[in-house]
Amino acid sequence: MQKDYIHIILADDDEDDRMFFTDAFEELKIGTKVKTFNDGVYLMDYLNAEDCNLPHVLFLDLNMPRKSGLECLNEIKANSKFNDIAIAIYSTSASEEDIEKTFVQGANIYIKKPSSFKTLKKVLSEVVTTNWQYHTNGLNKDNFLLRL
Amino acid sequence: MPYRVYQKPWFVKTVFYACSFVILLVGGITYRNISDLSQASDLVTHTYKINVELEQIFSYLKDAETGQRGSIITNDAQYLEPYYSGRENINNSFVELRELTKDNPKQIENLKELNKLIDVRMACFQKSYSFYAATDMNNPKFKENFLAGKNAMEAVRNKIKEMILLENKSLEAQQVELHKNLKVTPIFLYFVLLMALLLMYGAYAKIASNLKRLKKSNMQLEMFKESTNLSEIVSNHGNWIWNVEEDTYIYSDNLYRLLGEEPHAFLPSLEKFMEFVHPKDVKKLNKAVEKMMASENLPFTYFRVVHKSGKVRHLKAFAKKVVNSEGKTQLIGTTTDVTEEIKSFKLLEQRNHELERNNKELQAFNYVASHDLQEPLRKIQTFLSRLEDKESENVSETSLKYIDRIKTAATRMRLLIDDLLQFSRTNKADKAFEKSDLNLLLEDAKQDLAEVISKEKAVIKANELPNIKVIPFQFQQLFINLIGNSIKYKSETRTPEINIAYSKIRAVDEPKIKKKKGSYHKFTFTDNGIGFDNTYAKKIFILFNRLHNKDEYSGTGIGLSICKKIVENHKGFIFAEGQPGIGATFTVYIPLK
Amino acid sequence: MTVYLKFDFHAVCKKVLEDSLQAHDIKYNLTGFGEVELLQKLSPDKKQDLADTLQAYNIEIVENQKSVLVQKIKDTIIDMVFNEDTEVNVKTSAYLADTLDHSYGYLSNLFSEITYTSIENFIILQKIEYAKQLIIKNNLSLTEIAFKLNYSSVAHLSTQFKKTTGITPSAFQRIISKRREISQQQ
């Protein structure tokens, strides 16, 4: 039954961004369940819990208090339990070099937060469908790199 | 050749010894001559004495004869006195003569004969007198005896004459011999003296010329010393020598001055020097000196000294071991007053520090400004878009117009912030140079611009590009900015065409490169856009400098500044050239090494 | 130690399928990729058992006729892209219509309805995935890959790659090789 839903988590300390994010998924009308966290510590606490319902896609803001997105990324990559999660960096902006670095560190997706709601919707839907393709068509997840 | 002999240092010595020898020789010969002369006069005196004695003998004999005759005639016995004393006197003279003629055997013989003759004569006297005493004067024998006495007298006279003659003859012979010698020596002496004079003259000339040269070099030395002294004063340094074997020091005048003292104010020694050293540097310098003593070498050593006046100066010392012409080990050192250098260095360091801090602040400010400003701006834009999507029916026409204006302004602000951020990221620190295939970087740049390229149907042609060491992301950005720039300022009537040419060149062949050294990679980006007036060729690389109104073209005036910064990060040069209405050419030079 | 694997999904799936069917004592006939002809009628219980077993491998028994058709479209496309022997000279749309015996319009609509994506996008996705595999193998140049995947030029391939993934082929190659470097260090 849970298969009908695409499970999505966002960790972002910015309230407005969390709102845009959930609103966008609501309007997209894809079968998704969206969960948000205020920072990396809350996120990791949740993920590390025994009975955790692991997400299909995890969105990480880079600049978060207490535990940054990169720290979360490294922790997640170090634990094979999270191998199936597609990780999307969801950040304001970075240099080309820094973007490549996050990919090298194991991120699958890099999203520069768009400046219009329409674009946001488009970007998020693309992430979910692409991930769905990988999921349903048995594609090699190691090759899953997407930048939007 | 003779000049060289003349120049030899042993010349003067030889001349001195030769002259000494000549003088000794002359002295010897003169001594011999003088002794010869005195010998001659001795000979004369000797002969004379003999002759006198002989005459004396004869005269005594005569006196005796006369006395006898007188007494006989007068019959007075007192006349016999000379007769009696005659014999004694003759004997005395004989003793004298024997002494005088002891080295002449012939005269000795003659003297013996003479003695016999005198004895004969004396016997005659005796006989005659015996006749007289017996008054037998008329005895014929008396007469006969008398005659015999006369004959004996004659023989004595002859003998004496002969002896005198012989003495005179031998004197004469010796005189001749001496005379001969005395005649040769003056000539010889004269020549020898002449030679000695010549030699002395030569020696004098030599010594005089040496003296002249010595004077000249002494003067030069004096001048050099003076200029060294002056240069030491001018350049604020002093020299010193440490005679390693004797452990003595020689300080130049200015070294004393560096210590705030008058030249030669004290006897140079290590202990004395140490008294001037700043208390905090004593330990350090002692260590350096210990090392110097051990290794006979002193690398650059910095320390402070305190003058008596309390002034603190910074000194720098350096020394090297040398072995002088006498084979003695010396450590020659210089000590320089570097107070001013250190002062200016500290000032420079401080300025550098300030500059660095300013730069960092500026960079941080730039980054924060551009990065952190992005977020609120993005939100403004997102909320605007939400407003437009959801609420467009609920607001008035005017409000919609205002919203549109806000959107435009926000978009422009975004552009500025993005470019500023790009600019602030374009620094060299911690950016790795990697060997990169520029063809791939160009391809990636084209991918980045794919949208605008396909929209404008821009044609980009490029030569085969090299594989060189660059900061890959920055070089890609350079391509993006230059191509993007060309497309942005495209001509209204032509489709944009950009030609990228590459070649390897030498700096001397390129009039644009001012530093004529080394070789460069040369990239030219030529477009057929609107171009620009060449008077702005330099201005367009300046931050925020724009040639066009922002309503016409959406530039921020940052893109080309980024290009310049990137090229400078690669130690290269970038130049722009334009022809209004025809196109622009951007030339990038990157040094080969 | 890290080893790199190359999968033949067909073979793997086929093996899994065969093993499962045999485990359940079901007589079968493999008619094509993703299609099994059962030679006996299954009780609902037994069918559920089989479904559960296959579920463990993420293999789903597609009931819906539409879903079956979509799966057939996917299979055909994957076969086309990955199987170098397949003639790709013909237009994909014509090939699909021909092979599946439906009009391309119908297939296209059906596909979008079920998968939230278009046939075209799916083809591109598959092609790019194949390109990724070839890039990682590292012994082919982009020109060769473009030729192999029937692109008119390297630029065309790069453009599509960038459009699909957001990154350029060279960046992709760089990232993967750096990841390998890191995992080899560990």
Image (spheres, coloured by chain):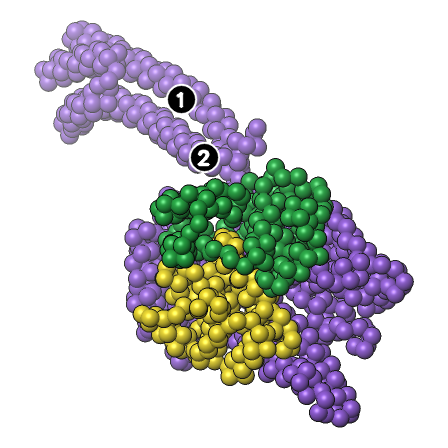
Chain colours: A yellow, B purple, C green
Q: Residue at x 70, y 68 (%)?
A: B559
**Residue B19 found in image quarter:** top left
Q: Left or right of B133: which side holds B411?
A: right
| Amino acid type of the residue tagged 1 in the rendering | Leu
**N-term-proximal mark, 1 vs 2:** 2
Q: Nearer the viewer, residue B214 or C20?
A: C20
Q: Give the crowd class for mark 2: few <14, some 14-19, many >=20 residues within 10 Å.
A: few
Does the image show residue B101?
yes
Picture quarter with the N terminus of chain B: top right
- Is the residue B275 above or below the residue B318 in the image? below
As drawn, the residue found furthest toward the left would be B134
Q: Nearer the viewer, residue C175 or B356?
A: C175
| Amino acid type of the residue tagged 2 in the rendering | Trp
Q: Left or right of B358: which side holds B110?
A: left
Q: Residue at x 72, y 89 (%)?
A: B393
- Is the residue B201 above or below the residue A105 in the image? above
Q: Chain of mark 1?
A: B
Q: Which residue is mark 1?
A: B178
Contact (Cβ within 8 Å) of mark 1 with mark 2: no
Q: Which mark is residue C56?
A: none
Q: Residue at x 46, y 66 (%)?
A: A3
User: Do marks 1 and 2 share a chain?
Assistant: yes
Q: Give the crowd class for mark 1: few <14, some 14-19, many >=20 residues within 10 Å.
A: some
Does the image show residue B221?
no
- Is the residue C173 above or below the residue B179 in the image? below
Residue B455 drawn at (x, y percent)? 78, 62
Q: Residue at x 56, y 78 (%)?
A: A26
Residue A89 drawn at (x, y percent)? 51, 68
Q: Which residue is mark 2?
A: B10
SS state under label 1? helix
SS state under label 2? helix
